Each structure stands twice: as C-alpha cells, then as structure tokens.
Amino acid sequence: MIIQSLSKLCVLLFLVSVVLIIDSSSAAVTNRPVLSITVRDGDVTNENNYFDYFCPTIHAKYSKAGKDPFPVDIQYGYFVAPSINRPSCSVWGKASQNIAGWRITAGAAVAAIRQKIVKQSSTTRNYPSSSSSSLKADIDMRAENPQNDISARIFASDMSISRIEFTKGYTTTSRHNNNNNNNRFTINPRYNPLTNTADVMFGYTTQSTSVKLHASRKSQQLSIAQQINESNVLTPTIGSDGDVSLRWEKQLLKGNDDDERSSYIATTLKPRESIHVEWKDGLWNANMNIPMDGSMEEDGGMHVGIRREVVF
C-alpha cells in the first residue's frame, strides 16, 4: 500500500515538474525543477523503449533557513526517473542546527523502485511479464565541529545501521616561494555492523598534490593526484590486487564540478578493463566507455551517452 502511494506521488511530481518547467514565464514560481535528458546507445526500434533510450530525469531541491525560536535549517527535494523497465522515485529531506559549536544534521530518503519481471519457461517461450515494487529507506545522521576539524556520521538502510564513520583532520602550514600553504591530513575509519567489516581512508592534500589511501583487511588502494599545471591533473591509482588505472583531466574552462560554466575532458585508462572518456561542457555532459577487448556486444560492449540539463 505504501509503495503504491509513493508510486502515485512520483507520477504526480513528474507531471507537476513538467508543468513548472513549461511555465517558465511565471514569476511566482521559484526553485523550478531541473530536467536532464540523456541520449545513449540502444535499440529504439521498439517504441516502448523510447523512455529508456532518452533517460529523462527530473530533480528539485528546496531550502528554508531557520529563524528564532526554531533555528533549524531545512532542505528537501525529490528525484524522478521514469522508465519502462525500471522507473524510480525518491523523496528526501534533512534538517540542520548548530548546537554548542557542532553542526547537527539529520536526513532521510525514501525511494520506490518498480522493476518488470519476465517469466521464462524451459522452452524459448516467455510468459507475460509482471512487475514488482520495492521500497528503500535510508537515514543519514552527522555531527560536525569545524573548529576542531572532526565529524561523525551514521548511515542506516532499511532500519538497520549500515555504516559508522569518524573523520579527523589536521592542518599544517608550509612555506613555499614566500607563500604560506595549508596542508591537510585526514583519517577516516569506517565500520559496517551488517557485514562486521572495517576499513580506513587516509588523505593528504597540499597545494598541488592529493594523496588518498583506502585500506581494509582484504585490499588496499593508493591514489595520487598531481597538478601538473593550471589545466592538467594526472591521477595514477594502484591496488593491492594488481589493478592499475590512470586518469588525465584537462581543464578547458575553470570552475567547480557543479559550476555550469566549467568545462573539462577526463580520460581514465584501466588496462585490464576499459577506457572511459568524459567531456563536460557547461550543462552538456558526454560519456564514452570502450572495453579493452574491443567487444561491441550489447552487454559489456561500448557505451556512449550524452546528457543535457535544462535549467529554467
């Protein structure tokens, strides 16, 4: 019953979002939803596959600053991805408040995923397909103290704690070319009560170098990002299992990853697996993944996707 209600809510959110996007001339509506359309390789001979071919998604984010006597900042939003085979919808929200130097944040997200199931017999004949829905609930609670550079987080999924982690940072100052540079070292231990496993993340960042080490009992991985110049960053990664990769990012237009004006080309080489190329140009984003064996099969073959976000 809950899943059906959430599914109906997803349809309603999608329709309302489309209306708000079309009615972009209305000055009364703020924080309009963002429509993202991805065109990727696939079989479009079947008209029922158009949704999966264009992969439209709509998401929105809203915020409200707290005021006395309730100084609680609230953020909420939703994400809708209509699809023929695997439609999904999620609704999320979080509340934050400053208490004695700590930033306390509690967030929750509920997602409904509907998947089509095709029944098969021992022969080649397929029985009529049916659909099943699943409901997933996640909780994220965190406490951050910027002054002491320490934070703690607890993740829960389906009413069970799935991860507990702490992060502690240390900042030092070094002098280079008559300039004071801040170097930061972080340690991030994590524990999963469901699987009784633990790992730790180490990080060290300077002005032009970033080092990350992920270590668990079964595997270790080291990644070093080196700023070659203002436009190029090389990031080699090596794992204890022998896997290596090399990422080269060339900045075409300065800006953060979330900046609409940023532009870059990033190429990641994994000798045992594939070559992945990402080209971001403002609101446009293109991805291409080529397997090293040259396979062009439908599953595991080359994939190409082009996405455009429409912001009103």
Image: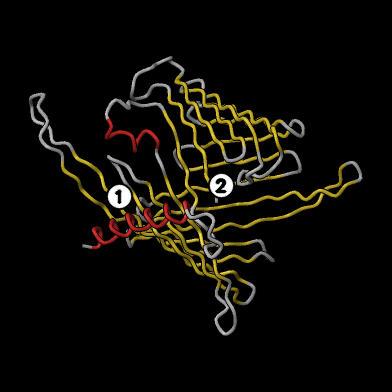
Report which quarter residue 70 is drawn in.
Answer: bottom right
Label 1 sits on residue:
113
Quick check: 62 above or below 289?
Answer: below
Spatial CA distance of label 2 from label 1 is 32 Å
149 displayed left or right of 35: right
Identify the disc placed on residue 305: none
Task: Confirm or deny contact between disc 2 and disc 1 (CB under 8 A).
Answer: no
Q: Position of residue 276 (x, y in %)?
A: 52, 26
Q: Amino acid at mark 1?
A: Ile
Q: Residue at x 61, y 41 (%)?
A: 212
Q: Residue at x 58, y 40 (%)?
A: 283
Q: Residue at x 58, y 57 (%)?
A: 167
* Element type at mark 1: strand
Task: Bin the neighbour count of mark 2 within 10 Å (Cα to Cα): few under 14, some 14-19, many 20 and up.
Answer: some
* Element type at mark 2: strand
Which is more foreground, mark 2 or mark 1? 1
Report which quarter residue 55 is drawn in.
Answer: top left
Q: Residue furthest right?
A: 178
Q: Position of residue 4 (x, y in %)?
A: 23, 58
Label 2 sits on residue:
201
Lower position in the chain sequence, tag 2 or tag 1: 1
Count of numbered badges drawn on the protein: 2
Q: Amino acid at mark 2?
A: Met
